Structures are given as structure tokens and as C-alpha cells.
Amino acid sequence: MEIQIFRDVRIPMRDGIALSADIYRPKQDGRHPAIVVRTPYGKTSKEIHANGCYFAEHGYAYIVMDVRGRGDSDGEFVPYRNEAQDGHDSIEWVAAQPWCTGDVGTMGGSYLARIQWLTALTQPPHLRAMICIVSPSDPFVEWPTGIPIPFHLCWLYMTSGRIMQNVDVVDWESVYQHLPLVTMDEATGRRIEHWRTEFEHPYLDDWWKQICYQSSFHKIDLPVLHISGWYDDEQVGTPLNFIGMTHHAATEKTRNSQKLLMGPWPHQINRSTKLGELDFGPDSLIDLRGYQLRWFDYWLKEKQNGIMDEPPVRIFVMGDNKWRGEHEWPLARTVWTKYYIHSLGHANSRFGDGWLSVEQPNTALADADTQPDLAKPASPRRTDQEAAEAASDRYLYDPSRPVPFISDMTSAQIGGPDDYSAIERRDDVLVYSTPPLAEDVEVTGPIRMELYAASSAKDTDFMVKLLDVWPNGFAQRLTDGMVRARFREGMEHPSLIEPGRIYKYEIDCWNTSHVFKKGHQIRIEIASSAFPKYDRNPNTGAPLGKASEMIVAEQTIYHCKEYPSAILLPIIPRGN
């Protein structure tokens, strides 16, 4: 089908601002359903042009717009703040055009996905379906730290002004070391007001709630195709959104009209079979455009193409390196299994004595009290806390020497299936591993850690990482999570901790689908930093991001009968 392209079409918003769009349309006369894509990254990229041509050739009007304040669009770019009403106005303008049937879908990834959700909450009358790819979550879901992560500054730098800034000219490794965090933008050579504004809201307040959507799925009555990858650095949002829509969407029909697609991909999905040192095989890449076309053909053209007869969940199971259809997420047949941490008191580094098993710790406080504690002088009477420390591990967290998180230094991709065996040589990383497995073990679903810990500080961090240790020693990161102690009761209720007191921390470690092969080991790491994925907690309890002082914290991780720290793994029974 021949197509025509119209450049820099001005689309009016309700406040008089005009946004710039390129419109790809079939050349033949008639009315066509439309797909609206709104982006801060420039509407003239090679990929966007290819998408526009593809969908126009298949009978769609494809409208790609620069968001307010970016590219050729008027106004000021303030991330997310104008996107709901601008998205609504754009959809309704498109629906009213003589070349449109009035049936409109939206699609896009990352920023482009989150603004679809914000737009959906305004309930545009002509919006029929969405494709949300690698959707960011609400504030603080991905980084529960109260302040933006260092990599966020790289993204703000890249999108500052009207054109894409070249992030490769900045020494980001040096920038991320800058303190206080609130003035880190100075180290880039470019003042970025939005970075500083975010530090004025160091918990989930009304300013942040204006751009939240994940508590409002009941207001959305749309079929959504949810797409992400296990190594997407914003992965957590996609399964959460699928769960939210299948359980809380406005109608039963909509709750049954959701699809989830998860591949072995990073944030830039479906680009290569390889990620880091691993190759997931030729089946790991799919005809994604074709799949998206089938989705829109069904919902915008009413083509009975069978897509809704297929299982609603399609996942790539790493390790087996195969796609599999499922009927829900998490899987109904999951055997939720706690793997408890154990040691003889010295799990520091991969050369320590930590181990991981399904057996609960059997050392009670009273039992621990009778055991010799080589780190303390003999005492005729010991407190319960001293007794518990006989079934615990200790390390020092020095924020001036944080545990590295392996990553590119820009915000393009944060982490992957990287080898952490060298980092596990550090004594401020606790390591707990199973023995080599006697048979394959599949872990598919959300991962959560229940951690009992104390600190000498008023505020600190705890990080947990799940890894697959290969027989050759390769320690493959699967997923991880963290908690900032002051937010242990949620992002709306910060409070400092009492030094020396034992607290229970619930740590969301996101999701995976992975088969630990026979002879491999399941491993978790516990530390107090993962830099620069997360900012360094200075341990002082001072206002977040505004001070430069740092102190060393003494951390104690408990694994006794009363404080049984464990990671909850979603084990999937294996067929014969």
C-alpha cells in the first residue's frame, strides 16, 4: 500500500500551545484507524520512521509527536507534568480528522509508555487500546530511595533543552561521585532545575502523586499489551501493571483483555540475542512489529485473527531458553518456597561460610546464648540481642567505598546478566549459596526477601541480589532489590531507625523466569550499597541528598530461629 507523509503538522492543545507531529497515512482515500505515539526523544529517528511506514502500509494513520517543549513542539518540557491532558487532546484531535475512523490506539516504550497510562486516566472517548513497552512505575517503585538515582540525572541531561544532548561527552563516573547530590548537575556543566526540584520532595507527597497511576487501574477500561524484558532496568512496572489491570480494571471484559509479553531483553527490547556475555539463542528474537500489528488489527479493525485466543501471558524462560504460554501472572501452580540464609557467623565474601537452604534456622536466642562468641569477651549474662548475634553476620558499610553495581555509566541500560564473582571477594558483601543442584530448578515470578537486620546508623540501606552460579564460577545476576531503612514502612511514612535495634525489612527484588540447571547454585548477596545504580546512603540520617558528610555503619544480618531471614522464591514444578 502506498503511503504519504506530512511533516510538522501543528496540533493545538487546550491551552493554546501547538505540538508538532509527523503523520504517516495510506495514500488511498478513505478513513483509517490511527496510532498515536508521543515522544521526548525526537520524532524523526530511523526506528520511528520505519514504524510509521510499516503501520501506514498496513492501513493505519500513524501520528508521531514531539511532546511539549521538545523538538518542534511549543511550550516548556517538564517531565510528565503536562502529558495527561496533552495526550488526551492529541487523541481527540486525531479522532476528529476526516481521514480517521475515530478509533485510536497508542503505543511506545519507557517515557512513551508511562505517559500512555497518565493519558488513559483522563479517559479519552476515542482511545481503544494501548501497547505499553518497558513502562516506568510510579515514583519510588523502581528506586525506593526518596530521591532520584544518579542515572536519572543522565536522562535529565539527555532530554534537557529541545534537542537530544550528547551524554557521551560527560564523565559520568566522576559526576556520580559528586556530593551533595542535589548539586550533582553542576558536575555535568549544565544546570538542570528539575533535578533540584525533585530533592524538595524526598517522600511520596502530593507533588509526586499528581503523576502516579498504579493505584488507579479501576479507572481504566482499555485492553493493554504489556511488554518488557527480564533485564529491563524498569522491568518491575510491567508485571505490576498487568496484575493491576487483570485484577482491578474497570470491567470484567477489560480485565480479560490484557496480555503480557516478557523476553530475555534489556530496556531496548528485542534487538539482539546476546546480552552481556550470554546468548539466549535465535528464538529470543520475535517478529514484534507483526505481533503489535495483530493487536491493533483486533482492537482497531475488529479482525478475528486469533490473538485473543492465545494464552494471555507469554514468557521466555531463561536457562531453558524457550518461550512458553501461561494463563496468569504470577503462575497459579507456583510453589512459594523460602530459602533461608545460614552461616557460622562469617558469610563475608564468597570465601565465607554462608549457605542457603530450605531448612529453617534452628538456633534460638537461648541456644545461641550458650555458644561461644569469639568476637566478644566471655560474659556471664548476655542480652537477647547479644545472643542473637551468635546467629548473625556482620560487616562494615563505608559509603566512601561502596559496593559497585556493574553497569554502563549512562542511563541507556542499567545492569544485565553480569558476572559478580569478582565483587563477591569483598568482605562487605555477604554471600549465601546452595550446594550444587541435583536437578534443574525453575524460578518464575516475583522475588521477595524478608531480612532481619540492625545497624549502628540512624538510616542506612540493604541490598539483596539473586544470582545463578555456574559450575565454572560465573555468578550471573538475575535480579535485585533494596530498602532504605527510613522508608521501611512505605514511601509516605519516613522515619529514622534506632541504632542497634533489629528490624524486619521486606525487599522487593522484582521478577525473573530462569531455570537453575543441574550442577549450578542458587545464590543471594546482601550488602548496603549498589553504586551507582542507587545513591550512597551516608548513614547520618540527615535530609536526603543535601549533605556531604558520610559515616561508616556497622551492619548485622540475623538468621536465628526468632529472626529467620529468607528469600521467597517462586518455584515452578518441572514436568517429567
Image: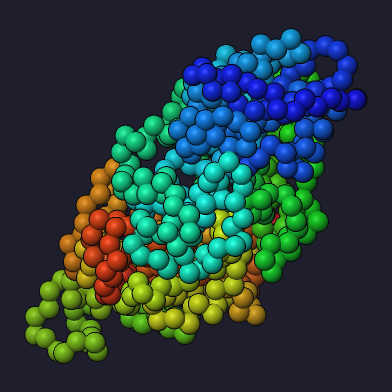
Which residue is located at x 73 percent, y 34 percent?
Answer: 292
- Which of the two residues, 462 or 370, is positioned nearer the viewer here? 462
Which residue is located at x 75 percent, y 28 percent?
Answer: 7
The C terminus appears in which quarter of the rendering?
bottom right
Left or right: residue 30 versus residue 231 is right
> Quadrant location of residue 311?
top right
> Quadrant location of residue 368?
bottom left
Q: How is the image coloured?
A: rainbow
Please provide percent x and percent y for residue 469. Answer: 58, 73
- Which of the two residues, 291 or 14, is positioned nearer the viewer here? 14
Please provide percent x and percent y for residue 43. Answer: 69, 37
The N terminus appears in which quarter of the rendering?
top right
Q: Is residue 12 above or below residue 351?
A: above
Which residue is located at x 52 percent, y 52 percent?
Answer: 157
Left or right: residue 25 versus residue 528 is right
Which residue is located at x 64 percent, y 78 percent?
Answer: 471
Please provide percent x and percent y for residue 211. Answer: 43, 34
Please provide percent x and percent y for residue 388. Answer: 23, 73
- Which of the two residues, 396 or 298, is positioned nearer the viewer here? 396
Q: Can residue 224 be seen here?
A: no
Q: Can residue 375 be seen here?
A: yes
